[in-house]
Image: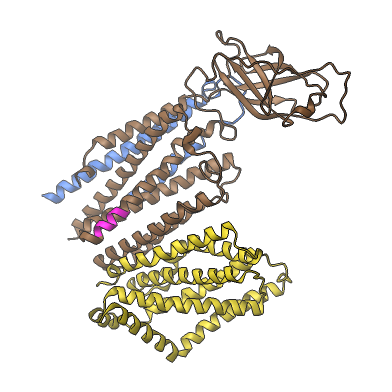
Chain colours: A blue, B yellow, C brown
């Protein structure tokens, strides 16, 4: 289950490539001028936060299991 | 028993068994013949034998050899009954067994490739102009196929004699080999001389054929031990 | 063994990846020319070309002298009468005499611009000269090759290089490339573990080898996914015939075969030994080819078949600022996932006892 979930998450990670801008721009400093870049950065940050909090949560669960096995 | 004599005795034993059970040999021959026939009819009824390009010709040729050698080599370890390996285990070193199997399969695959070439040139056509290069390719290709699939059949035989497993394990590894083989035989069809590219490809295949049996020799004792 | 349980490198990977994701999106692309019109011109008359810049600062104070050249071969022809319309667009007048057309090395002109903020920026083969059939000697139009004098050659702010075809997708360098680094690192780690297992016979190393392959496959699939999206954007198709791509696909296939092999043997010790043997055998054969085939045949990837090497000028200092942290961060994340898988497997094994 963990394995599948991790796979799924890593697939989401690859979505960041979709969030990249169009190649032809008209306004100055395309990525910053329209505020889309902040949206994609926010989405990416949330995804990363989710991944890392998930990983740390698993770490804690594993620690509990290991401690239980030791006793 | 020293290494050489034990290799020789297993090799002779395998060859004798092969000729006694002629139906196995006949089965492989029929396999080659019928696959060439399938290709012949598929091409003939589309009237495209004449415009067969060198690359397509060599791909078809090497694919037939690939499938028939997989079938032939799969027998080399699967055929032995379970108990006989224990017997070998007491008699000879694992290196001797794998060397004998490699030699045997090399002879068998080489014969198979030459035979396939014969049937192929009879039935489909023989566009080869550069026979030295083509013969080198057949020898190198036969060696590469036989060494690779002998190792894979040793692994697969330990994993419950599963013939599908052998294909699954071996086919990804055979892709690079087939790239060089088709390149070389296409070159043998297209040009009469040795080009720089041809020599480079021959060296590649040679390197492949040295690395493979070395690895097999080192790793087989671990595979074989129970 | 203890390093599986220590926390600091996991935090380091989190920090590095946050830095990379947020930082790389905030850094703009360096200036470039995205468009020019008209696309072709004939000799003996003056044309007005509209040049569209990308991330340029024509209207900023301190922009200094803005200059444009039309470059053919090694000749820089000065464009005249610059008229700045906005921060990103300008008009220049340029014409060439028919008596000059035969001395040109090529009919395709590169457009080169320069100002004090944006440095030098260019559009390769932007306009084409349609040569006149005969030389008109009465023409007064004449392009001059002036001396090229600039204040700054490089842009004066932090920016990623502007590359045609890649454009903004250059940021995928921090995601796609490290995926393969992680996969290679984990696969070689697995190879080492398999060798140790065969010599020492400690079943812990078998668990290591197995779980690192699982983690490596995860990153291999991610590498293929990021690469496919990138290939669609730049080369036009999700899958192109490229030795590196095909090699990667074969690599992923080999490791799926490894998992199938493990699944088909029930006896634990036998499984560990045979899987280790297959792992070593396949990796050595595969490495032999993956490092040689791309060097023999043409590849679309940088660094192969006559393409410029990756480190040569694809990676400039601004990319390095994010690329190295990204590589380290992703590799640490890969080993983190590996450590979680391993600990899970060890717990499972203890449970069964």
Q: Is residue A10 left or right of residue C165?
A: left
Residue furthest bottom in the image: B20
Residue stretch rendered in magenta on the structure: C191-197
**B165, above or below C92, in the image:** below
Q: Main secondary structure of the magenta part?
A: helix
Q: Measuring 60% from the left and 11% from the top, which residue is drawn there?
A: C59
Coordinates of residue A50 in the picture (x, y in percent): 36, 36
Coordinates of residue B116 in the picture (x, y in percent): 57, 77
Q: Measuring 59% from the left and 46% from the top, which residue is drawn there?
A: C237
**A20, above or below B195, in the image:** above
Q: Nearer the viewer, residue B152 or C15?
A: B152
Coordinates of residue B141 in the picture (x, y in percent): 50, 69
Q: Measuring 48% from the left and 38% from the top, which residue is drawn there?
A: C310
Q: Is residue A24 left or right of residue C344?
A: right
Q: Measuring 46% from the left and 71% from the top, which residue is drawn there?
A: B143
Q: Quadrant of the N terminus of chain B?
A: bottom left
């Amino acid at each position: 289950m963990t394995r599948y979930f991790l796979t799924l998450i890593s697939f989401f990670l690859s979505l960041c490539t979709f969030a990249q801008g169009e190649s032809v721009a008209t306004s100055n400093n395309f990525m910053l001028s329209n505020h889309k870049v902040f949206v994609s950065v926010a989405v990416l940050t949330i995804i990363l936060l989710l991944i890392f909090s998930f990983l740390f949560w698993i770490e804690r669960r594993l620690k509990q299991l290991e401690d239980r096995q030791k006793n | 028993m020293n290494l050489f004599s034990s290799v020789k005795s297993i090799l002779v034993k395998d060859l004798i068994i092969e000729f006694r059970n002629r139906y196995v040999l006949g089965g492989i021959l029929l396999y080659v013949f019928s696959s060439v026939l399938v290709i012949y009819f598929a091409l003939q009824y589309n009237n495209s034998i004449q415009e067969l390009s060198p690359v397509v010709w060599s791909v078809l040729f090497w694919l037939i050899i690939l499938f028939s050698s997989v079938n032939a080599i799969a027998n080399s370890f699967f055929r032995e009954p379970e108990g006989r390996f224990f017997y070998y285990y007491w008699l000879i070193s694992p290196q001797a067994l794998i060397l004998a199997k490699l030699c045997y399969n090399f002879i068998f695959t080489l014969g198979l490739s030459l035979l396939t070439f014969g049937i192929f040139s009879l039935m489909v056509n023989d566009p080869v102009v550069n026979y030295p290069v083509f013969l080198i390719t057949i020898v190198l290709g036969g060696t590469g196929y036989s060494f690779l699939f002998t190792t894979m059949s040793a692994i697969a035989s330990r994993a419950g004699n599963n013939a599908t497993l052998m294909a699954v394990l071996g086919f990804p590894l055979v892709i690079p080999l087939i790239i060089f083989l088709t390149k070389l035989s296409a070159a043998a069809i297209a040009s009469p001389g040795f080009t720089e590219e041809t020599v480079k490809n021959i060296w590649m295949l040679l390197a492949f054929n040295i690395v493979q049996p070395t690895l097999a020799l080192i790793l087989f004792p671990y595979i074989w031990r129970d | 063994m203890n390093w599986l349980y220590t926390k600091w490198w996991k935090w380091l990977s989190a920090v590095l990846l946050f830095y990379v994701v947020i930082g790389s999106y905030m850094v703009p692309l360096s200036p470039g020319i995205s468009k020019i019109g008209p696309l072709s011109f004939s000799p003996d008359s003056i044309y007005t070309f509209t040049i569209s810049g990308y991330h340029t600062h024509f209207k900023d104070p301190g922009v200094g002298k803005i200059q444009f050249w039309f470059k053919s071969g090694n000749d820089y022809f000065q464009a005249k009468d610059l008229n700045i319309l906005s921060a990103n667009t300008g008009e220049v007048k340029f014409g060439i005499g028919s008596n000059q057309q035969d001395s040109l090395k090529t009919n395709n002109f590169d457009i080169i611009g320069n100002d004090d903020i944006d440095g030098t920026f260019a559009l390769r083969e932007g306009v084409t000269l349609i040569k006149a059939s005969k030389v008109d000697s009465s023409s007064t139009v004449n392009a001059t090759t002036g001396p090229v004098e600039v204040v700054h050659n490089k842009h004066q702010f932090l920016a990623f290089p502007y590359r045609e075809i890649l454009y903004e997708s250059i940021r995928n360098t921090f995601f796609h490339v490290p995926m393969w680094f992680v996969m290679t690192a984990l696969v070689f780690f697995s190879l080492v573990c398999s060798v140790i297992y065969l010599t020492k016979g400690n079943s812990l190393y078998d668990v290591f080898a197995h779980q690192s392959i699982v983690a490596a496959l995860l990153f291999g699939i991610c590498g293929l996914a990021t690469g496919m999206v990138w290939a669609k954007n730049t080369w036009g198709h999700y899958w192109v015939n490229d030795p590196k791509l095909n090699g990667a696909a074969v690599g992923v296939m080999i490791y799926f075969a490894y998992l199938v092999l493990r699944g088909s043997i029930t006896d634990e010790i036998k499984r560990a030994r045979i899987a280790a043997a297959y792992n070593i055998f396949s990796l050595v054969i595969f490495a032999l080819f993956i490092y040689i085939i791309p060097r023999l045949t043409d590849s679309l990837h940088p660094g192969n078949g006559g393409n410029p090497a990756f480190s040569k000028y694809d990676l400039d200092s601004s990319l390095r600022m994010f690329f190295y942290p990204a590589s380290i961060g992703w590799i640490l994340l890969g080993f983190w996932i590996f450590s979680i898988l391993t600990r899970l497997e060890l717990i499972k094994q203890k449970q069964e006892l």
